[in-house]
Image (cartoon, rainbow, N blue to C red):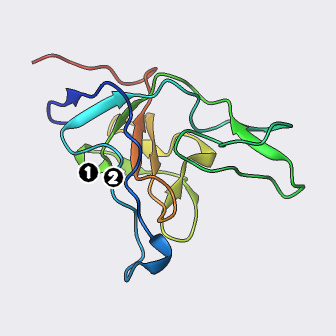
Amino acid sequence: MTEPLTRLPAVPEPPFFAWWDADEPGPSPATVPSGRFAIETEPYGAPVVATDVPGPAMPRRGAKADVHGQWLVSQGPRGNIVINPDDARGLTLQHASSACCGATPDGGMNQLCACGTLVATLCSDCCLPYELHLSADHVRAVHP
C-alpha cells in the first residue's frame, strides 16, 4: 500500500495555504511529508454527531455546524495512520463526501483497497488539510 515510511512523533500542523487565492483548484499542501507517517490520537471522520460545545469538528479542521446551526464533532476512530496521500498505492476513491475541489472525511472511509475493502479516509478538498487516514482496524505496518 506504501513504500517504507518513517514515523513522526505526532501529526504535524498543516502548512498555511491561502486556498481562496489559489490559481488552480485542488488540494492544499500535504500535512504529513512524503515518506513519513504519524498516528492520529483524536477521533477522526464519521460518524460526525451534534454537540452543544463549539470547537473543531476534527483535528486540524475548524468548527462545523449542521443545517440547524448545531455544532458537530467527530466520534470516528482513534489511532488512524496518517500519511501523505501521494505515498499511497493501489487505492481507489469510493463514495466520497465531496466539496468544491475534493473529498472530505465527513462520510467516513472513502478509499477502496484492491481487495475490495474500504481501508482509508482521504481528505483532499482545497480548504481542508490534505491527508490520508489509514484505518488502524484494516491496515498494519509490515517490517521488511
Q: CA distance from mark 1 to mark 2?
A: 9 Å
Residue with the mark numbered 2: 30
- Identify which residue, 80 or 13, lies in the foreground: 13
Q: Quadrant of the N terminus?
A: top left
Outermost left residue:
144
Residue with the mark numbered 1: 86
In the displayed structure image, the side of residue 29 where residue 61 appears, left or right: right
Q: Residues within 10 Å of mark 1 (few under 14, many from 20)?
A: some
Whether residue 43 is situated above or below residue 26 in the rendered picture: above
Determine which quarter of the picture holds residue 12. Answer: top left
- Amino acid type of the residue that numbered disc 2 sits on in the rendered structure: Ala
Asked if the residue at tag 2 contacts the one at tag 1, i.e. Cβ–Cβ closer than 8 Å, the answer is yes
The residue at the point 62 percent across, 47 percent down is 106
**Label 1 secondary element:** helix
In the displayed structure image, the side of residue 54 where residue 25 appears, left or right: left
The residue at the point 26 percent across, 51 percent down is 86
In the displayed structure image, the side of residue 122 where residue 105 appears, left or right: right
Sequence-wise, the earlier of marks 1 and 2 is: 2
- Amino acid type of the residue that numbered disc 1 sits on in the rendered structure: Asp
Q: Is residue 1 visible?
A: no
